[in-house]
Amino acid sequence: MIDIRELRDDPARARASQEARGEDPGAVDEALSADERHRTALAGFESARAEQKAFGKRVARATGEEKAALVAQVQDLAARVKQLGAEAEEAATEREAAMRRIGNLVMAGVPVGGEDDYVVLEEVGTPRDFKAEGFEPRDHLELGELHGAIDTARGAKVSGARFYFLLGIGAELEYALMGLAQKISREEGFLPVVPPTLVRPDTMAGAGYLDAHADEVYHLEEDDLYLTGTSEVALAGLHADEILDLTGGPLRYAATSTCYRREAGSYGKDTRGIFRVHQFTKTEMFVYCRIEQAAEEHANLLRVERRILEALELPFRVIDVASGDLGGPAARKFDCEAWIPTQGRYRELTSTSNCTTYQARRLNTRERDPRGGGTRAVATLNGTALTSTRPIIALLENHQLPDGSIRVPSALQPFLGGRHVLHAPHD
């Protein structure tokens, strides 16, 4: 959540941020109102407590009728202390609830608007002209079925809609993609992690995934655990309630895990193939750093994502995501979108978000303030190195040959036994 002190000092900025997100600016006034009630009740509570302690000393020294009168006053005072404490606690709970409805403060320069109001920052590579090459491109599902690599029919039979099997070269491609992402992230100084994929409610809420995204996550009610839709959640909780030593620089992690998403609200969208699915594998980068380093670390995460996509030899573009499409924890987000030939458009493959201190404040992750004066929240950032399904789609479609075979980018060849081409079976 955002800093209550920032909210008090500049509520207009928070209201403007909420409006830019398309969310309720009234949450700001609700939080401020509850904050004022809390501060008033807390001041009254502390004053009454001090008075109660002073009375205790007088009672101890008094005798006879004076003592009886003082005892009666102490009892009244104790009741008032209890009431004021309850009022302060209730107001703090209300403030907390309102604060959790306020998204991170949108950074200056972020495009204002909804999903379609992004700004294209750069286009890398040129989409192939299949017509000039003399053939019509097949889509990823047709290619996957041709290679015996993707089976959505049996996935649906076993688990339902939006599930699939990756078989043979399909499974090998997933392993190769994760291997490449792990190799590059290690080279870039990220510590490899195998994280838990089930987390407690406080971790899921702390990462910001039980607010607007609560309908996207799977909940195991009997155990009160959540299946994570990204390793970001577990990595955000890794240092909860800790004071980090960042004097040696940022802490950088890269975790590979199976991820689960309910895809609520996506009925009818991307129903063909494996673009929008309930289960996939992902390598996710995560950074803890000082507030002053966050913008630089964000640029670095984007650079690493670009390096990976360039290694896959895919045409892609980088977009600055608009305010209404950021998600609650992000103050700014960049997406890398690969060209999908049969759809004739760019689709998201990776994403990187600067969450400033939003997650760390919820999860109580701090550092010693280098300016002195105690501790302060750290900044957290995340970035997708690669997922398993969408890059497979982009690889199959962009690198297909007229007979349905698939050219293998040189960076992936070591992970696929040195093969340069994945040959299509022939009758």
Image (tube, helix red, strand yellow):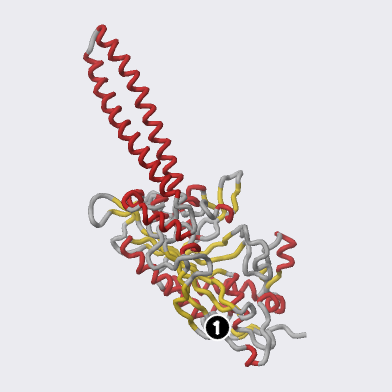
Q: Position of residue 204 (x, y in %)?
A: 50, 52
Residue under the image location 44 percent in, 41 percent down: 94
On screen, residue 22 above or below 334: above
Locate residue 153 relative to residue 275 in the image: left or right: right
Q: Is residue 253 visible?
A: no
As drawn, 138 above or below 24: below
- Tell me residue 125's x, y (percent): 50, 84
Q: Quadrant of residue 348?
A: bottom right
Quarter residue 265 falls in: bottom right
Q: Quadrant of the C terminus?
A: bottom right
Q: Quadrant of residue 257?
A: bottom right
Q: Residue at x 62, y 69 (%)?
A: 275
Dot 1, crowdedness within 10 Å: few (<14), some or many (≥20)? Answer: some
Q: Which residue is mark 1?
A: 409
Q: Amino acid at mark 1?
A: Pro
x and y percentages locating residue 21 in the rendered image: 47, 59
**Relative to 139, is 156 above or below?**
above
Badge 1 marks a residue whose secondary structure is: loop
* Residue 349, position as x, y percentages in the image: 54, 72
> Taking 247 as reference, is 193 left or right?
right
Residue 352 appears in the figure = yes
The tally of labels here is 1
